[in-house]
Image (cartoon, grey):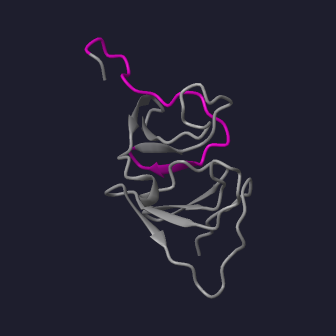
């Protein structure tokens, strides 16, 4: 937050957000924005957004400022992906699939521990979904 109370950081315009997650809690909620795409390569990023953010919303519904999430190397988190799906379950945010800079479908599964905001890539199992992008996923508790 700036000295005048304004927000110092915000995710610039994007579409096909790599993941948009909403975590509700008694003290409010958190919104996550992971990666995505832009319509231009004017900034030299190839149209892929390589940044991730979160925003806290208090129990009265007041939005805080966007905060940058730690940006590990591209190989260590799904930043630089677009059109993925996201599922929230307990203390983890799971990001599956999407596409890279040449629009090739991906079959990666990334999991972020919400508590310490660390990412890990899950290893493929014998039964594994095909690579895909612009798809949906949901977590069902029970």
Q: In this orientation, which residue lies closer to the viewer: 31 or 85?
A: 85
- Secondary structure character of the magenta stretch overall: loop
* Residue in the picture at 58% in, 71% down: 141
Q: In this orientation, which residue lies closer to the viewer: 9 or 131?
A: 131
* Residue in the picture at 29% in, 11% down: 4
- Tell me where residue 40 sits by quadrant: top right
In percent of width and height, residue 115 lies at: 34, 58
Up the image or down, 50 lies above or below 132; here it is: above
Q: Residue furthest bottom?
A: 126
* Residue in the picture at 62% in, 30% down: 41
Q: Residue furthest top?
A: 4
Q: In this orientation, which residue lies closer to the viewer: 101 or 124?
A: 101
Residue 21 magenta: yes
Up the image or down, 123 lies above or below 23; here it is: below
Quadrant containing the C terminus in the rendered view? bottom right
Residues in magenta? 3-27
In percent of width and height, residue 101 lies at: 63, 47
Up the image or down, 43 lies above or below 67; here it is: above
Residue 106 magenta: no
């Amino acid at each position: 937050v700036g000295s005048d109370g304004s927000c110092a950081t915000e995710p610039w315009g994007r579409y096909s957000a790599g993941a948009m997650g909403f975590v509700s809690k008694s003290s409010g909620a958190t919104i996550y924005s992971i990666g995505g795409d832009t319509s231009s390569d004017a900034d030299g990023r190839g149209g892929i957004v390589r940044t991730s953010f979160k925003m806290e919303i208090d129990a009265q519904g007041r939005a805080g400022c966007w905060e940058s999430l730690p940006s590990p190397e591209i190989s260590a988190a799904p930043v630089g992906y677009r059109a993925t799906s996201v599922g929230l379950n307990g203390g983890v945010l799971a990001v599956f699939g999407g596409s890279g800079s040449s629009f090739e479908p991906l079959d990666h599964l990334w999991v972020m521990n919400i508590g310490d905001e660390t990412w890990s890539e899950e290893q493929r199992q014998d039964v594994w979904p095909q690579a895909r992008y612009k798809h949906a996923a949901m977590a069902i508790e029970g």
